[in-house]
Amino acid sequence: MIIKSPEEMIELWTQIAKKNSKILLYWDLWAGKTHFTKWFASGIWINPDKVQSPTYTYINIYENKLLHMDMYRLDDVTEFVEKWILDQIGEYDYVIIERPKFEENYVDNSWLKIQIDKISEKERKITLH
């Protein structure tokens, strides 16, 4: 599907938040990963102003129910285990992982995979798996 405005994007993410609690995000840099998480958080009654990119912190936790992670900087599965990431994934009601890696260690059929490709400044191509 093609999303043509921020309003359409907000509506889509709100609907996703109502139906999914574990999400993997695949997409280009600057395509809106943190904005997605803000809209998702809003859909589960978390103040979206609290949401920040976890690129450098690896993990951000919001109101003790949403784990927001970016695996971009993880180099190997050993680092994944040493940082207790696998244990943390299972502890929260909602999990959003940007640029996921090592999926065979934690992904089952309950995860929604979202591929987002930036078409233009406002348009995104969304593929849900």
Image (spheres, grey):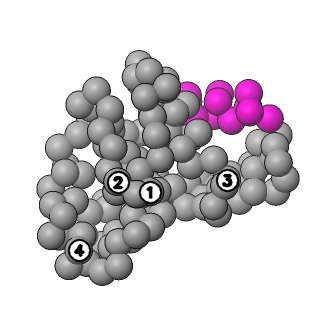
Q: Which residue is mark 2?
A: 57
Residues under labels 4 and 1: Cα distance? 15 Å
Residue type highlighted by circle 2: Thr
Quadrant in which the C terminus is drawn: bottom right
Q: Earlier in the sequence, mark 3 or mark 1?
A: 3
Q: Horizontally, is 19 left or right of 125 in the view?
A: left
Q: Amino acid at mark 1?
A: Thr
For residue 83, above or below residue 7: below
- The residue singled out by tag 4 in the image is 79
Crowding at mark 2 (Cα within 10 Å: few <14, some 14-19, many 20+): few
Tell whether position 86 is magenta: no
In the rendered structure, are the residues bearing label 1 and label 2 in contact, judged by CB atoms less than 8 Å apart? yes
Q: Relative to residue 67, is residue 7 drawn left or right?
A: right
Residue 54 pos. (x, y %): 41, 50
In the image, taking residue 93 as reference, residue 22 lies left or right, namely right
Describe the element under mark 3 as helix, strand or loop.
Answer: loop
Q: Residues within 10 Å of mark 4 (few under 14, many from 20)?
A: few
3D distance between C-alphas at marks 2 and 4: 14 Å
* Sequence-wise first label, 3 or 2: 3
- Residue interval drawn in magenta: 5-16
Name the mark nearer the viewer: 2 or 4.
2
Q: CA distance from mark 3 to mark 2?
A: 20 Å
